[in-house]
Image (tube, rainbow, N blue to C red):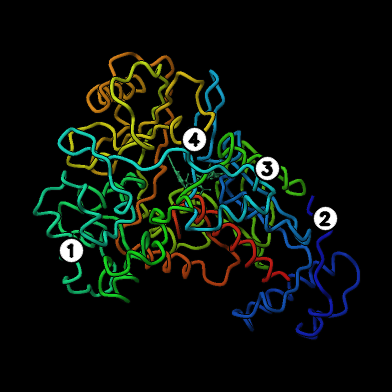
């Protein structure tokens, strides 16, 4: 299957040591290449890829989540490379999975993509899905404070409150907290060094604002602890704005920070696809006809050949010239340990937390109170087994039949509930009990399901960007790249960007 691979002889003869030029039969050619590459490594290690012009490089992508699929899409586009994608499970898409059951459209993992990070929407449009882009029909969200849900004013969703008018409707924070928020402009600017989400927002806006709004919003989506997660790795634009303007309130009317919810009334901060995000995976996979996709295949180990190519142990041994790791850091670490030992510790050091999505469908009549907006968040200091809830059928069109309400509860957080310790039944019971308290729903749901995401949520702790530098340096000049949620951006847009950038970088390297 690896036939058709050629090395550009012009380039070789220009650079090759004279003693290996001139072999003609096949064996001699192979020897020629081996000697040549060994010689090149010895004499010019840093320029090895600049002068080996492999016209048809063999690229292996490990992992068939959205990062791996996006990498495969770009790697195969010009038909110049032989691309293989290896996935250990029996399906593609990784954490993206939409289920169609009981007349419901149920997202098991993610349900939308930020528009402030353009890479997901760009890919959707490129794939011809523009007409299927779907904006949320609901707007806004609530936060649980003192056991009660309070609507969060739109102006605060960007976490850059600008004026006293924006604060009028947040009586639930208390007068002292509001005063403190309004004094943000007078707070001295920080050093610009990495710090935690909690430290950044408590410093700028005070504890109450941080704990009630910033931390559940920014740390909650990572099922993480605001006391550990890195601002520089996750929300660098807030640091940038602070450094540039000295205050966030001062710039709140400017463009929204990357990764922050949009404050614009015209453009939604996030979108999905009609029928769910699975559509993105399905259409992307259709474009990978020339890619050799191997499901149910676990990559276990990689070795390096003398000529710089690789042997990939995955059911059988596959040879390749370049690799893209689109799997979690802890899965990549042991595979790479033989050829990049310096990457092992830092890769293993990227912690991943477990989370679960519990989905429920109720008859609309079960709710005594009207449900507001797209859902609610639960700050870590509120007694609750869920960290947040999306009102899926109020947020998106056609998710549940008329007369029904589809809810998704998020469970599990670093430093909080460890979902691995509980059965599905226990999780469902705990969430139903919370709905009883927070939403005053008394009836039983007629549909339930639990999607478990074990060691799925990367925790970018303070220092994560430095850690990534160490990992990439440990790999050095080898044509091995990382893409995906463990590395340089956690959400779907960033995974797509990393996957496509990795493939494009190899395309250039093997031009
Ligand atoms: C509950 C939940 C809700 C989320 N909500 C959102 C959201 O609304 N919006 C958003 O943008 N993001 C969201 N995210 C994050 C987003 O889903 C992920 O960041 C993204 O899908 C990760 O893609 P990936 O390709 O990096 O990894 P994955 O999807 O994890 O794919 C990695 C693949 O590699 C395979 N694999 C692992 N080891 C090996 C091996 N040794 N050999 C071969 N294959 C291997 C795995 O089976 C898997 O299929 C959410 C995540 C979760 C868990």
**Label 2: few (<14), some (14–19) or many (≥20) C-alpha neighbours in 10 Å:** few
Residue 491: mark? none
- Report how far apart the C-alphas of labels 2 and 4 lie in the structure: 48 Å
- Report how far apart the C-alphas of labels 2 and 3 lie in the structure: 28 Å
| Secondary structure of the residue carrying numbered label 2 | loop
Hey, which quadrant is residue 74 in on the image? bottom right
Hey, which quadrant is residue 19 in on the image? bottom right
- The first of marks 2 and 3 along the sequence is 2
Q: Which residue is drawn at the image coordinates 72% and 47% (left, top)?
A: 288
Q: Which residue is drawn at the image coordinates 41% and 55% (left, top)?
A: 262
Closer mark to the observer between disc 2 and disc 3 = 3
Q: Which residue is mark 1?
A: 203
- The first of marks 2 and 4 along the sequence is 2
- The first of marks 3 and 1 along the sequence is 1
Question: Residue 253's x, y, as percent?
Answer: 35, 65
Compared with residue 144, is residue 406 higher up or lower down, i.e. above or below? above
| Secondary structure of the residue carrying numbered label 4 | loop
Q: Which residue is drawn at the image coordinates 27% and 26% (left, top)?
A: 439
Q: Which residue is mark 2?
A: 3
Q: Which residue is mark 4?
A: 396
Question: Residue 194's x, y, as percent?
Answer: 29, 67
Q: Which residue is mark 3?
A: 283
Question: Residue 430's x, y, as percent?
Answer: 27, 24
Closer to the camera in the image, 211 or 133: 133
């Amino acid at each position: 299957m690896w036939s058709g691979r050629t090395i550009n002889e012009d380039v070789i003869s220009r650079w090759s040591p004279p003693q290996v030029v001139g072999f003609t039969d096949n064996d001699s050619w192979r020897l020629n290449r081996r000697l040549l590459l060994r010689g090149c490594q010895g004499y010019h290690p840093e320029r090895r890829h600049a002068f080996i012009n492999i016209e048809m490089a063999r690229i292996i992508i490990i992992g068939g989540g959205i990062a791996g699929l996006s990498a495969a899409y770009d790697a195969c586009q010009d038909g110049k490379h032989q691309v293989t994608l290896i996935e250990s499970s029996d399906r593609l898409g990784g954490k993206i999975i939409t289920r169609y059951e009981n007349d419901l459209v149920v997202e098991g993992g993610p349900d939308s993509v930020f528009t402030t990070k353009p890479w997901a929407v760009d890919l959707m449009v490129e794939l011809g899905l523009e007409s299927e882009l779907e904006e949320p029909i609901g707007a806004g969200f609530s936060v649980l404070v003192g056991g009660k849900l309070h609507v969060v004013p739109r102006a605060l969703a960007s976490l850059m409150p600008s004026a006293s008018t924006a604060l009028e409707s947040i009586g639930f924070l208390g007068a002292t907290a509001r005063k403190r928020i309004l004094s943000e402009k007078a707070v001295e600017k920080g050093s610009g060094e990495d710090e935690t989400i909690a430290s950044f927002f408590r410093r700028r806006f005070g504890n109450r604002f941080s704990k009630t709004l910033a931390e559940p919003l920014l740390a909650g989506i990572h099922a993480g602890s605001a006391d550990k997660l890195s601002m520089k790795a996750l929300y660098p634009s807030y640091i940038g704005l602070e450094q540039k303007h000295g205050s966030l309130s001062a710039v709140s009317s400017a463009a929204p920070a990357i990764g922050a919810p949009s404050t614009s009334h015209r453009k939604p901060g996030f979108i999905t696809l009609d029928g769910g995000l699975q559509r993105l995976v399905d259409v992307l996979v259709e474009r990978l006809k020339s890619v050799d996709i191997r499901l149910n295949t676990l990559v276990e180990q990689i070795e390096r050949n003398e000529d710089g190519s690789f042997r990939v142990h995955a059911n059988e041994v596959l040879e390749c010239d370049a690799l893209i790791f689109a799997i979690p850091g802890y899965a990549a670490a042991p595979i790479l340990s033989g050829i990049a030992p310096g990457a092992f510790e830092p890769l293993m050091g990227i912690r991943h937390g477990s989370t679960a999505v519990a989905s429920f469908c109720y008859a609309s009549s079960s709710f005594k109170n009207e449900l507001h907006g797209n859902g609610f968040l639960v700050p870590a200091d509120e007694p609750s087994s869920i960290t947040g809830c999306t009102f899926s059928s109020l947020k998106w069109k056609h998710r549940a039949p008329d007369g029904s309400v589809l809810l998704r509860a998020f469970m599990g957080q670093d430093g909080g509930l460890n979902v691995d310790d509980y059965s599905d039944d226990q999780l469902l019971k705990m969430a139903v009990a919370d709905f009883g308290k927070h939403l005053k729903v008394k009836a039983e749901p007629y549909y339930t399901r639990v999607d478990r995401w074990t060691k799925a949520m990367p925790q970018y702790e303070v220092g994560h960007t430095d850690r990534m530098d160490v990992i990439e340096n440990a790999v050095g000049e080898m044509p091995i790249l990382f893409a995906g949620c463990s590395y340089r951006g956690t959400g779907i847009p960033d995974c797509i960007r990393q996957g496509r950038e990795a493939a494009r970088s190899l395309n250039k390297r093997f031009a």
